[in-house]
Amino acid sequence: MKAIVVRPPSTGAEITDIEIKPEKLDGLSIKILENGVCGTDREIVKGLMGEAACPPGDRYMVLGHEAIGILEEDGKYLKKGDIVMPVNRRGCGKCLNCLCGRPDFCETGEFIEAGISGMHGFMREKIIDYEEFLVPVPKEIRDIAILAQPLSDLEKSFDEIVSVQRRMIWTCKDGTYNCRKALVVGTGPIGILMGLLLRSNGLMVYMANKREPTEKESKIFQTAGIEYINTEDDFSGVLMSGLRFDLIFEASGGTADIAAKSLKILKNNGVLGIFGFSSTGHAELSSEDLQKLVYRSIAVVGLINGQKPHFQRAMLRLSEWNTIWPEIMKELITKTVNINDKVSVMKVLESKGPGEIKVKITW
Ligand code: NAP
Ligand code: BGC
Ligand code: ZN
Ligand code: ZN
């Protein structure tokens, strides 16, 4: 079958015919309809993703962890013709968290991830998968459902941030999060989805990038009631202004010093959530900085991977946003390329076009 293939740690990707040994003989056959392109896919193609690894015994890996497809046969609960999204991380089969459906907290680190590490991904004509890893896609959101995979990672992250903040009273006097201020650094698909998720959970949201927002970004931020900050000056303007945040969410995958510098604009008891895979530089923290972290009860937390409950919630969230922000939802898929257009497919895998948010590859 036709597939998009990478060979980590080598750079590059190719569209080629592969013969894949049936991975799950008793799984269900799913015809892939479309894939989403994530920042992580581009990092793998550029050789920047240290965790990328072929499945054991194979010298290549099918790329892709964002997919929707159509079931070609009946399952126990799902039916032939249903549109489904596969969950991308699978457990180690050994640790308690994996055995309880939460490989996002795998204790052995031996989990595998479709198209990222140790498991063939979803950028291919067909996959065979077990029903337990398939999430039904509501018909009403079919055109934007590809966003549910990245959104699942963020639903999980928000849950985790809230559970970290259960160490104190983080809800406001009215029981909501309306008095809490969040800063999201990075305005890629991840940053934008997180900004929307925080808004729909009631927080005041600011988004930051080292440039002026594009017209599309401005429209999205305005509609959702999000403020924009240009942080070309490495947060010194924010520092001077006195604006401080209860939560900073690193969604840029840019230089490592973003994490260290942004700590200075966190409120006491604040959380720095690191989600992006920082690709360059290093973060410097002096003994004085560390003392301040302790005195100010700052929490720094790594945030990764959503699981089936988060995928299900992401589907509902997209349905909700489709109702309250239909004009935003229309803007999020900025490009669709077909697998037969090899040149365009390679281009979208290699680099991000100006103003691009989510790119889809259709089959
Ligand atoms: P993306 O499309 O590359 O977006 C990155 C965004 O950050 C872009 O808007 C970029 O600006 C901006 N940026 C770069 N350097 C910056 C800086 N120094 N300050 C402020 N903004 C900066 O990537 P994505 O798909 O949104 O993903 C974001 C990151 O999350 C990636 O590292 C990805 O691998 C990671 N990720 C992690 C998980 C997880 O589970 N932890 C899941 C998915 C993705 P321009 O628009 O100007 O380029
Ligand atoms: C995926 C996550 C995955 C992470 C680490 C992201 O791009 O969306 O689900 O856990 O990469 O490999
Ligand atoms: Zn991803
Ligand atoms: Zn495990």
Image: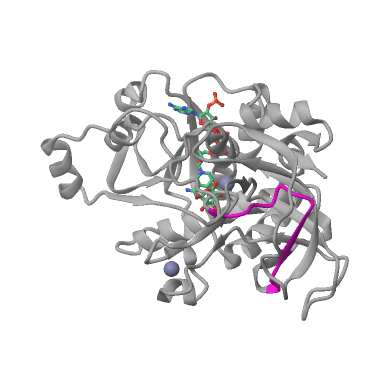
Q: Is residue 266 magenta?
A: no
Name the quadrant containing residue 85: bottom right
* Residue occupying the point 60% across, 31% down: 12
Colouring of the image: one colour
* Residue occupying the point 50% across, 40% down: 205
307 to the left or right of 79: left
| Quadrant occupied by the C terminus | top right
Residue 361 image offset from top left, x and y in percent: 76, 40
Query: Over which residues does the magenta segment extend?
Result: 118-131
138 to the left or right of 108: right
Up/down of 254 relative to 51, above or below: above
* Residue occupying the point 38% across, 51% down: 302
Residue 242 image offset from top left, x and y in percent: 31, 30
Up/down of 214 relative to 68, above or below: above
Of residues 128 and 334, the one drawn nearer to the viewer in this rendering: 128
Residue 104 image offset from top left, x and y in percent: 47, 62
Of residues 27 and 328, the one drawn nearer to the viewer in this rendering: 27
Residue 310 image offset from top left, x and y in percent: 58, 62
- The reply to whether residue 27 is visible in this rendering is yes
- The reply to whether residue 358 is visible in this rendering is no
Q: Residue at the right extreme? A: 81
Name the quadrant containing residue 153: bottom right
Up/down of 316 relative to 339, above or below: below
Q: Residue at the bottom extreme? A: 76
How many numbered callouts? Answer: 0
Up/down of 214 relative to 29, above or below: above
